[in-house]
C-alpha cells in the first residue's frame, strides 16, 4: 500500500519506493543521491495566475473545468509568481532533476508557452543549457482564449532532456513527435495529466524507477504501476497527497477525498 511520508522523515530512496513524499520538491530532490532515478515525468504549475491581460483571475467565471478550479491556483500554491522568479525556480528544479537521473536516464518535462504583454513566454528558456534531445508537441482536444490578439492555443510542449546513452524502448520510435491526446476532465485536480499521455511515456521507456516531483493527483504513479514500474511521488499539498494516495491504492471514491 502506498503511504505518505513527511519530507523530514525521508532519508533513503529505497524507503520511499512506491510512496508519496509530502514536501517541497526542491528540498526533497536535494536529498536524493546523484544518478539514482531512471525516468522523471512531470508537469509543474504553469504560473497561469500571473497574467498581464485577460487570463485566469480569481473570483471570475472562466474556463471549462467545473467552477474553473484552476483560477484558485493549486491548493497551497497560488500559481502567481513574477515571471523571472518562476523561470529561476523551474531552472533550479531542472538542475536537481538532471543531477539525479542515471547515466542512461531521461526527463519528460511538460510545460506550456504563454503570451503575456503581447509577446510569447517561451518555456524553452527553462530548459536552455540542459541536453534537450527533442520537443514533443501534445495536442489537446481544446482550449480557451480570452485575447483577440492571437489564435486559440491547443498545444503544450513535452521537453525530452536526457543523458547521451538514453534510448527509447524497442519499437517506441514508431510514435511521432506530435501526440493527440484528450485532456482529463473528470479529475478534481485543476490541471491533471491525462493517463493516456503518461502511459505513452512510460511504455516508451525501460527505466524501472520513475519520479514525479509535482505529482498532483498521482497519474504518473498510476501509469507506473500499470507497466510494472516503481515510483516516487513528491507533492507539497497535503490535500493532493491524500487524493493521490487514495487513487493509487484503488479507492473507488478517490475523487471525493
Image: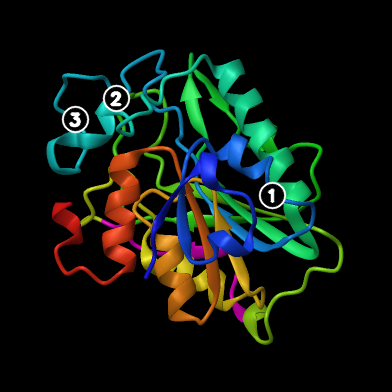
The residue that appears at 19% across and 30% down in the rendered structure is: 62
Q: In the image, 184: left or right of 177?
A: left
Q: Say which residue appears at 29% left-offset and 51% top-offset.
A: 242
- Which quadrant of the structure image shows residue 125? top right
Task: Please tell me whether mark 3 sits on a helix, a strand or a loop.
Answer: loop
Q: Which of marks 1 and 2 is nearer the N terminus?
A: 1
**Residue tagged 2:** 56
Mark 3 and mark 1 residues within 8 Å of each other at the beta carbon: no
Residues in magenta, as a range: 174-184
Quarter of the image that includes the N terminus: bottom left
Q: Position of residue 56 (x, y in %)?
A: 29, 25
Q: What kind of element bears circle 1?
A: loop
Asked whether residue 227 appears in the rendered view, the answer is: yes
Q: Nearer the viewer, residue 232 or 166?
A: 232
For residue 113, above or below residue 84: below
Mark earlier in primary sequence (2, 3): 2
* Label pair 2/3, CB-CB below 8 angstroms: yes
Q: Is 176 included in the stretch rendered in magenta? A: yes
Judge whether 122 appears above or below 116 on screen: below
Residue 10 on the magenta span: no
* Residue drawn at point x = 30 percent, y = 69 percent: 249
Q: Mark 3 points at which residue?
A: 62
| Residue 183 seen by the camera | no
Q: Is residue 28 left or right of residue 247?
A: right
Given residues 147 and 188, the one toward you in this image is 188
Amino acid at each position: 500500500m502506498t503511504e505518505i511520508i513527511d519530507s523530514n522523515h525521508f532519508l533513503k530512496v529505497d524507503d520511499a519506493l512506491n510512496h508519496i513524499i509530502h514536501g517541497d520538491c526542491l528540498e526533497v530532490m536535494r536529498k536524493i543521491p546523484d544518478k539514482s532515478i531512471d525516468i522523471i515525468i512531470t508537469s509543474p504549475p504553469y504560473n497561469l495566475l500571473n497574467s498581464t491581460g485577460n487570463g485566469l483571475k480569481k473570483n471570475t467565471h472562466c474556463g471549462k473545468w467545473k467552477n474553473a478550479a484552476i483560477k484558485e491556483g493549486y491548493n497551497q500554491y497560488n500559481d502567481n509568481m513574477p515571471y523571472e522568479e518562476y523561470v529561476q525556480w523551474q531552472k533550479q528544479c531542472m538542475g536537481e532533476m538532471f543531477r539525479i537521473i542515471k547515466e542512461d536516464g531521461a526527463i519528460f518535462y511538460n510545460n506550456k508557452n504563454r503570451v503575456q504583454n503581447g509577446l510569447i513566454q517561451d518555456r524553452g528558456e527553462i530548459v536552455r543549457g540542459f541536453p534537450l534531445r527533442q520537443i514533443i508537441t501534445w495536442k489537446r482536444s481544446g482550449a480557451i482564449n480570452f485575447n483577440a490578439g492571437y489564435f486559440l492555443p491547443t498545444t503544450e510542449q513535452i521537453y525530452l532532456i536526457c543523458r547521451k546513452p538514453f534510448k527509447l524502448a524497442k519499437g517506441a520510435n514508431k510514435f511521432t513527435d506530435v501526440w493527440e491526446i484528450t485532456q482529463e476532465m473528470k479529475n478534481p485536480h485543476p490541471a491533471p495529466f491525462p493517463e493516456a499521455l503518461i502511459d505513452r511515456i512510460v511504455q516508451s521507456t525501460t527505466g524501472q524507477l520513475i519520479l514525479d516531483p509535482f505529482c498532483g493527483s498521482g497519474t504518473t504513479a498510476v501509469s507506473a504501476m500499470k507497466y510494472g514500474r516503481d515510483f516516487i511521488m513528491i507533492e507539497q499539498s497535503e490535500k493532493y497527497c491524500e487524493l493521490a494516495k487514495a487513487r493509487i491504492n484503488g479507492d473507488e471514491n478517490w475523487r471525493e477525498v
